[in-house]
Amino acid sequence: MAEKGEDDQTVKYYRLSEVEERNSFKSTWIIINHKVYDVTKFLEEHPGGEEVLREQAGGDATESFEDVGHSTDAREMAKSLLIGELHPDDRHKIAKPPESLVTTVHETTSWWSNWLIPALAAAIVTLMYRIYTAEEEA
């Protein structure tokens, strides 16, 4: 199904079921940010190895792609592999990335936990080193 996109260019839409079928060595498609990429010819060239792409084949690779922190060059190269977009009706079917498990603690820590504990640890290590070297000299 093709429709006009934002730039008045024809956009090819693919259903999720079509993408899911493309997970073989003959045809490997992945979804990144609702865009569909045919990475079949890129499998052997992928710097992270073809198995990385094969694991994501036929599904949503957005989280994995973003977690790796691909370079601007990699993102430009991906544009050459773009074949269309995931159909808007299927976008809700893709599992959303889990909420971050990192929590921010808003309590202020006291100076002793930032300075005193490391200073004491350094003093103990220094003392142990001096005792050790003094025993060797004797």
Image (spheres, rainbow, N blue to C red):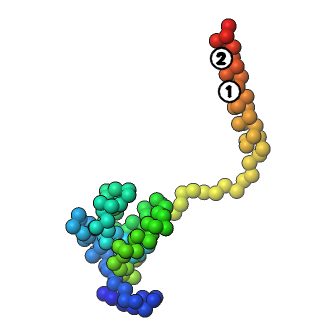
- Quadrant in the picture for residue 133: top right
Residue kind at label 1, given as amino acid type:
Val
Q: Which residue is mark 2?
A: 132
Q: Which residue is mark 1?
A: 125
Badge 1, how many Cα within 10 Å: few under 14, some, many 20+? few
Quadrant (top left/top right/bottom left/bottom right) for the C terminus: top right
Residue at image coords 34%, 83%: 13
Query: From the viewer's perspective, is residue 86 above or below residue 52?
Result: below
Asked if residue 63 shows in the view, the reply is no
- Quadrant in the picture for residue 76: bottom left
Query: From the viewer's perspective, is residue 15 above or below residue 49?
Result: below
Residue kind at label 2, given as amino acid type:
Tyr
Residue at image coords 67%, 10%: 137
Residue 63 lies left or right of residue 27; in this view the side is right
Q: Which label sits on residue 95?
A: none
- Quadrant in the picture for residue 27: bottom left
Residue at image coords 73%, 41%: 113
Query: Which element carries disc 2, helix, strand or loop?
Result: helix
Q: How many marks?
A: 2
Residue located farthest toward the left when viewing the structure as drawn? 26
Residue located farthest toward the right when viewing the structure as drawn? 111
